[in-house]
Structures are given as structure tokens and as C-alpha cells.
Image (cartoon, rainbow, N blue to C red):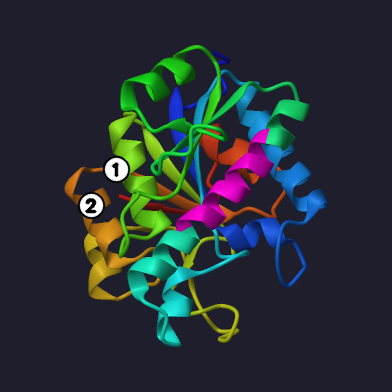
Amino acid sequence: MAALSQYKRVLLKLSGEALMGDQGFGICPDMIKYVAEEVRSIFDLGVQVGLVVGGGNIFRGIGAASYGMDRTTADHMGMLATVINSLALQDSLEKKGIQTRVQSAISMHEVAEPYIMRRAIRHLEKGRVVIFAAGTGNPYFTTDTAAVLRAQEIHAEVLMKATKVDGLYDSDPVTNKGAKFISRITYREVIERQLKVMDMTAISLAMDNNLPLIVFNLRSKGAIRQVICGEPVGTVIR
């Protein structure tokens, strides 16, 4: 592994919205190529990469539940949306010459492997990117929680959460131009201040297991590689 890299194994969490680009829905071909290139930049350093991608660009379970759909049904539909995104990302990564496996928490043998922890770790050890689809396989749990869970299971050294802003702020920087950037913070402070970086289940699980979380801007080209190389990018939560 190149000396530049600070980590051997990481888990990268992408929102489904990240794959939309500037579209209002679906998968933007240019954006998914961009994401694959960014992943390639750390793969080339010898880093073992796991990925969890959301499904909000196609279907958001909690949103559907708010207008009357059964929450369990809605969440299962959201999980299927994450599988669509995972397959698209797999295709884009493999076009970059990176062997990739999709493992789904919901059995669908024709399109993805079932999630098996030891098999996932073996893939990573063999230099394959592993995309963990369908969340945890359970309703009422977000893909943020799935990302923390998978990071723990594969013994990732850090969880990297890609967002549309530069990191964590004391309020929403989109609506409040005076929002102050936070470069370092503890999980307990995140909970006490109710900062919306992840849902509280994910934050609590990460805190209980001492999993470092780095929040950064996906659209800042090269940011993933900068994080991996230990440069002061984004917000570090410990």
C-alpha cells in the first residue's frame, strides 16, 4: 500500500441523492462516472473499499410513509432502490477496471450476492470493492445505520460520509448563510446539539463502538483521496 494512505480499509457512505447530479430524480450518468473515478483514486492507493449507497434519488421510504403508505412496505421499496443504485455503481466501477461485488441484505441471487460478512471481507482482501445494498434488510433502519453496521462488521478503520456540503455546520448552511463550520466534534456533542449529520441510531452505534466518522463534500474533486491521505478535509467526529 502506498505510503500516502492513512487507512487500510474504509467504508464510504453515499446518499442516493448524490447520484442524481443536478437532475431532480434518478441516476445522472456523468455523476456516477465521477463517483467511480473518485473511488478509483483511493483504490489505486491500495485501500480496501466498502460502499453503502442510499436510494433517495429513486424512492425514500420514510417520505412515502408520511403520506399514508405502510412504513414497512415503503422501507422495503427504499431498500430495492438502493439495489438499483448499487448495480449502477458496480457497472461504472467495473468500466474503470475495478472488480466489484454487490452484496444485498435482501436475497436476490440473480442480481447480487447475499450479504455474508466473511465473504465480504475476503473480497476486500482480494482487492475487490464491495457494495452493500438493501440497507440492513430491516424496515425502520436507515442506510446511515447500515453504513455504521457494515463498517463495524468488516472492521473498517473509518466511515467516510459523502455529502453536498463541506462537512458539519452548527446549522443548515443551505438555509443559513451564517452557519459556522465545525472541523472536529465528539459524537456526544452531535447528539446533545441535535446536529443532523446522521440519524441518532447511526450516531449512537458509531459512538458505542468508537468508529471515527469523517464528513466531507463529494463534489469537491479529490476530497476522498485527501481524506484518505490524512489532509484536514471535512469534519472529523470521534
Q: Position of residue 62 (x, y in %)?
A: 42, 74
Taking depth in this image into account, of 226 and 11 the one nearest to the observer is: 11
- If you read the primary sequence from the N terminus, does the residue marked by circle 1 or circle 2 appear first? 2
Range drawn in magenta: 79-90
| Res. 68 image quadrant | bottom left
Residue hosting label 2: 205
Taking depth in this image into account, of 186 and 91 the one nearest to the observer is: 91
**Which element carries disc 2, helix, strand or loop?**
helix
**Which element carries disc 1, helix, strand or loop?**
loop
Q: Amino acid at mark 2?
A: Leu
Is 40 on the left or on the right of 126, as rendered?
right
Q: Main secondary structure of the magenta part?
A: helix
Taking depth in this image into account, of 162 and 171 the one nearest to the observer is: 162
Is 64 on the left or on the right of 87, as rendered?
left
- Quadrant into which the N terminus falls: top right
CB-based contact (under 8 Å), mark 1 and mark 2: yes
Q: Quick one: which residue is furthest to the left in this view?
A: 208
Tell me the crowding category of disc 1: few under 14, some 14 to 19, or many 20 or more residues within 10 angstroms, Cα based: many
Of marks 1 and 2, the one in the foreground: 2
Residue at image x 29%, y 43%? 211
Residue hosting label 1: 211
Q: Is residue 94 visible?
A: yes
Is 48 on the left or on the right of 185, as rendered?
right
Q: Is residue 186 visible?
A: no
How far apart in space, not on screen, are marks 1 and 2 (Cα)? 8 Å
Magenta stretch encompasses residue 170: no
Residue at image x 55%, y 84%? 178
- As drawn, 1 above or below 8: above
Tell me the crowding category of disc 2: few under 14, some 14 to 19, or many 20 or more residues within 10 angstroms, Cα based: some
Q: Amino acid at mark 1?
A: Leu
Taking depth in this image into account, of 104 and 8 the one nearest to the observer is: 104
